[in-house]
Image (spheres, grey):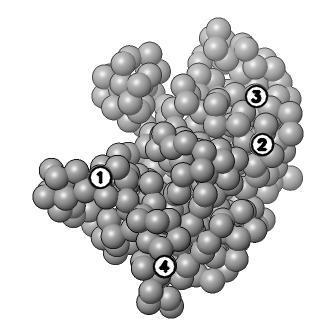
Amino acid sequence: MGSIPKKTMRAQQYDQRDNKLHLNEIPVPEPREHELLVKIKCASLCHSDVMLFEPNEQNLILGQNPVTIGHEACGTVITTGSSEAAKKFKVGDGVGFLCAVDCCFDCHNCRNVHNAWCVTGKAKMQGFSVDGYFQEYAVVDARAAMVLPEGLDVKAAAPLFCAGVTAYHGVEDCELEAGQWVAVIGCGGLGHLGIQYAKAMGLKVIGLDIAEQALEQAKKCGADHVFNSIKDKDWKQKIMAITGGGVDAAINFTASKRSYDDCPSIIKPGQGLLMVVGIPREPLQLNALDIALGRYRVKGSNNGTCYNMRPAIEFSAKHNIHPHMTKFKLEEVPKMIELMNSHQAQGRMGVVFD
């Protein structure tokens, strides 16, 4: 079972009352029967975390206040609950996990859609409606956790347990064949992983971004061509020429509505796909005539459940796919958010704990 090491811990908590982060001292949680208490070794920042501070129209659900932010992490098991699922883990295991809690994990929606739509109506997401992972210890549902495969470092693999699973399925769910063209829009935290997955699947990749450092990273990750869609006024025509009529899929990892508006112009008519991954503040606007006449198809990709987590993580280990992560201290999370908002971050940013 193990034992809880101390009574309180530090946590970066968002407070709705002043729309700011506060480094608070809070109690170390105790695991329920189906949970694991995990010593967080690495927690990384996702754009969804930053949406807490922004006005948005995307139904971002908040719960307790203040709440510890962060929904990407890895750690080691400190103690376990008494359920069969929890007892599959042992103290000291290096684990990764997804953030859904208080759902059944067994209904059709949990198995085939997303835990957010669990038929119980009780699902919560850690980092939003209950405490997340920018804290020293966290409880996680054992049913949404897995032991890290050999080759993945518990202090570096945290981004795989949201960004990795999301990026992997963003590419995999396009159902392309080796040799086809894919555009990765947004080459940062999600996109740099998406490029690695796409190349490992044998696809030809065009990277699009407005930040030069992101495009340099895209090249390092294997992109065949990259374009700055602000500086290069002819980027659309160049993509059409390179691909012979358009990409087979455009995967948008950004929170930019404008980038979504630009996507149809580079997709191959009649068979191309727009894969929706990134969530802009405003709802998307699609031309109904384009869809009705089959100019392109639109699809979304599940950003991670315990049922599609393992294939993504095992693929990452097998193909040596690692997130590029800049390390920070817990008290520097506000700085991480500033860097993300100013588009100065490269890859992922994470807090590494002792």
Q: CA distance from mark 2 to mark 4?
A: 31 Å
Q: CA distance from mark 3 to mark 2?
A: 18 Å
Q: Amino acid at mark 2?
A: His
x%, y% of residue 20? 49, 70
- Report the mark closest to the observer, 2 or 4: 4
Q: Amino acid at mark 4?
A: Lys
Q: Which mark is residue 319?
A: 2
Q: Which mark is residue 147?
A: 3
* Crowdedness near tag 3: few (<14), some (14–19) or many (≥20) residues, C-alpha within 10 Å: some
Which tag, 2 or 4, sits closer to the chain's start? 4
x%, y% of residue 328? 76, 67
Q: Which mark is residue 270?
A: 1
Tell me the SS state at disc 3: strand
* Residue 91 against residue 124 in the figure, above or below: above
List the residue tagged with mark 4. Answer: 238
Tell me the SS state at disc 4: helix
Which tag, 3 or 1, sits closer to the chain's start? 3
Which tag, 1 or 4, sits closer to the chain's start? 4
Q: On the rendered structure, is 293 left or right of 254? A: left
Is residue 237 or residue 27 the one in the foreground? 237
